[in-house]
Image: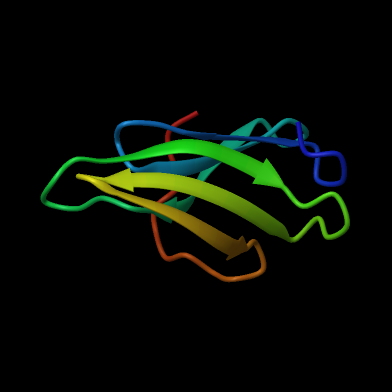
Amino acid sequence: MHSERKAIYTGGLDGLVVRYDMNAHKSTIIMERRRPQISKINAILENPHNPNLLLVSSVEQAEHNLLLHDLREKYDSPRLAS
């Protein structure tokens, strides 16, 4: 659980990073890494000094990526069903 925002961040084989808000009881797509080839999220780490930053590890075929994502950045996607 993120220490400042009271949320859980998850990712997986669907290439989505999802934020589950523990106070509002809702989920929101934070980032989408879907590609025609297989794309998966390996790990999500919070920045201990800045609650607005996440480090996201993803794999696309044979390529490994580390992405720095700013949570203040807006992502236009519908909210996931609760």
Residue nearest the viewer, comparing 25 with 17: 17
Q: Name the residue furthest left.
A: 36
The correct choice, above or below, for 52 with respect to 79 in the image is below
Q: Which of the colour schemes (rainbow, by chain, secondary structure, one colour) is used?
A: rainbow
Q: How many marks?
A: 0
The correct choice, above or below, for 64 with respect to 82 in the image is below
Q: Position of residue 30 (x, y in %)?
A: 51, 53
| Residue at 61% over, 52% down | 55
Quadrant of residue 61 within the rendered picture: top left
| Residue at 78% over, 39% down | 2
Residue nearest the viewer, comparing 38 with 31: 38
Quadrant of residue 6 within the rendered picture: top right
Q: Position of residue 37 (x, y in %)?
A: 13, 46
Q: Position of residue 77 (x, y in %)?
A: 39, 57
| Residue at 85% over, 49% down | 48
In which quadrant will I find the N terminus? Answer: top right
| Residue at 80% over, 45% down | 5
In the picture provided, is 44 more to the left or to the right than 61?
right
Q: Name the residue furthest bottom.
A: 73
